[in-house]
DNA sequence: AGCACA
């Protein structure tokens, strides 16, 4: 008497929004299923390839009456329900809703959701991510972000097949050690499919890239403060050396002009270029030497010292990620001492390129069209990114050679010769920069006891 | 041809 099995096969089942379909053709697709069922109502969910033979399916309607109408129709129809000419048997399911076994992440798509386990956001650069996933095909776009799950990235491929290949190969595996920073022991990848098909990347930045659109604007603040520290063999952060120094000037009670800086920094070698700009309300300057070693000596000698006595205009020096400044040859905020003074006027219109188009030595990505922004070596300190930061109007003016400024505008506002001595009267007791440049070049240290 | 997360 315990024929609960027979009970289940009675044809008078309680109606359900969920219909059970059997005798479906092999590998019946969801589309075929929907094609059959949608005339009777709105389908809110399906489950295909059910059962040992994978020839059964469930369809859930939004409304019970819709399910009833389908069952009723085929109960009295002259032709049975068919898919590919095969008769399909339909009845109410004994469940009232379809619970999706398949999580959204299991539905294949061309965009992957990658979770990087065991790392801090920023431990893995977007360049490394790009490198790893490019092994499987052209990576269109990448967006990285932080979620409760950890550091995640969305990787957009051309098609599902490419994305699937990457997922199959990389899911559960770790990014090769040699691509990780020293202090990162491992980075396991957990990969699922994203529901996205086309990422909306607004800017090229440290956290998002659109490799299909090199002309996408660079996020003004994208690279601020999130640059990666370079870690030495001892695991301690170390600056990426450069021939260009970034000087942050604290407690700037007195004007610091290009000429003042030229005097100070010339003590250690030839100063090629100087650019002064404002960053976050602080005056900063980039000072370019011909080589790293000169910059290094200057950095070590000047770090923490003040241009004027009394703690005024204290210098804090770091290496810039720039290697060759693109500055106006002569303005009140910048100077290019490598340009002969007599040719200044000619040099202006001919300086067309934006600074971020400067080739960067050691750039990781060839010909990606992003220039320095995408390829700059990491740096410990937030370095100025003049042309990217709209708040840095001074910096922008100094760095970018804007044709509309010519000719002559800068000259009228800054009539003094390029090599004039510093035009300021130092504070009482000021010790520093008014000495003749030649003198300080010989022996720099006395000024910085 | 007969109910899916075991």
Image (cartoon, rainbow, N blue to C red):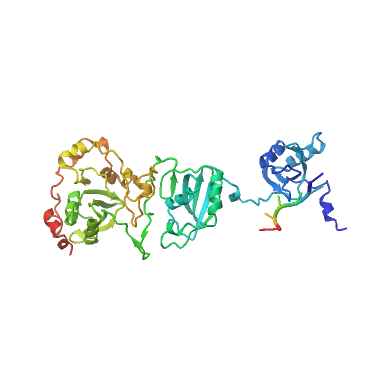
Q: Is residue B4 above or below residue A33?
A: below
The quadrant holding residue A246 is bottom left
Residue at 24 percent across and 52 percent down: it is A287
Q: In this view, does A245 lie to the left or right of A93?
A: left
* Percent of width and height locating residue A256: 20, 52
Residue A436 shows in the view: no
Which of these two is toward me, A374 or A77?
A374
* Percent of width and height locating residue A309: 17, 61
Image quadrant holding the N terminus of chain A, namely bottom right
Which of these two is toward me, A396 or A329?
A329
Image quadrant holding the C terminus of chain A, namely bottom left
Residue farthest along the right direction in this orientation:
A1
Tally of marks = 0
The quadrant holding residue A402 is top left
Residue A177 shows in the view: yes
Residue farthest along the top direction in this orientation:
A78
Q: In this view, does A415 lie to the left or right of A36?
A: left
* Percent of width and height locating residue A108: 59, 46
* Percent of width and height locating residue A230: 36, 58
Q: Is residue A262 left or right of residue A323?
A: left
């Amino acid at each position: 008497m315990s024929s609960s099995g027979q009970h289940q096969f009675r044809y008078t089942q309680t109606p359900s929004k969920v219909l059970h379909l059997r005798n479906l053709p092999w590998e019946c697709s969801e589309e075929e299923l929907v094609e059959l069922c949608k005339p009777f109502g709105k389908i809110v969910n399906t489950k295909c390839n059910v059962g040992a033979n994978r020839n059964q399916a469930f369809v859930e309607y939004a409304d019970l009456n819709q399910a009833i109408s389908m069952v009723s129709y085929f109960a009295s129809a002259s032709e049975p329900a068919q898919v590919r000419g095969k008769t399909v048997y339909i009845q109410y399911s004994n469940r009232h809703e379809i619970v999706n076994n398949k999580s959204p992440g299991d539905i294949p798509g061309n965009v992957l959701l990658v979770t990087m386990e065991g790392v801090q956001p920023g431990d893995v650069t977007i360049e490394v991510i790009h490198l790893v996933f490019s092994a499987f095909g052209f990576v269109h776009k990448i967006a990285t972000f932080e979620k409760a799950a950890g550091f995640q990235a969305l990787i957009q491929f051309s098609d599902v097949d490419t994305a699937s290949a990457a997922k199959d190969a990389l899911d559960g595996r770790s990014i090769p050690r040699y691509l990780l920073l020293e202090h990162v022991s491992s980075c396991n990848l957990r990969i699922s499919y994203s529901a996205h098909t086309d990422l909306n990347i607004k800017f090229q930045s440290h956290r998002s890239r659109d490799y299909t659109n090199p002309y996408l604007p660079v996020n003004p603040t994208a690279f601020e403060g999130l640059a990666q520290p370079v870690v030495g063999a001892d695991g301690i952060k170390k600056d990426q050396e450069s021939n260009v120094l970034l000087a942050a000037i604290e407690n700037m009670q007195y004007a610091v002009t290009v000429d003042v800086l030229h005097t100070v920094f010339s003590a250690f070698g030839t100063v090629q270029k100087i650019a002064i700009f404002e960053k976050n309300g602080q005056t900063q300057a980039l000072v370019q030497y011909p080589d790293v070693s000169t910059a290094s000596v200057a950095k070590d000698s000047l770090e923490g010292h003040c241009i004027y006595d009394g703690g005024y205009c204290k210098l804090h020096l770091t290496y810039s990620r720039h290697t060759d400044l693109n500055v106006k040859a002569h303005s009140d905020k910048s100077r290019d001492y490598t340009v002969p003074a007599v040719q200044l006027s000619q040099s202006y219109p001919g300086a067309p390129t934006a600074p971020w188009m400067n080739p960067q030595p050691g750039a990781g990505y060839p010909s990606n069209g992003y220039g320095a922004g995408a390829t700059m070596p990491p740096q410990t300190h937030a370095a100025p990114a003049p042309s990217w930061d709209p708040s840095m109007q001074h910096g922008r003016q100094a760095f970018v050679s804007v044709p509309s400024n010519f000719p002559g505008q800068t000259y009228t506002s800054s009539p003094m010769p390029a090599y004039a001595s510093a035009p300021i009267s130092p504070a009482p007791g000021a010790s520093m920069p008014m000495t003749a440049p030649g003198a300080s070049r010989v022996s720099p240290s006395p000024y910085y006891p």
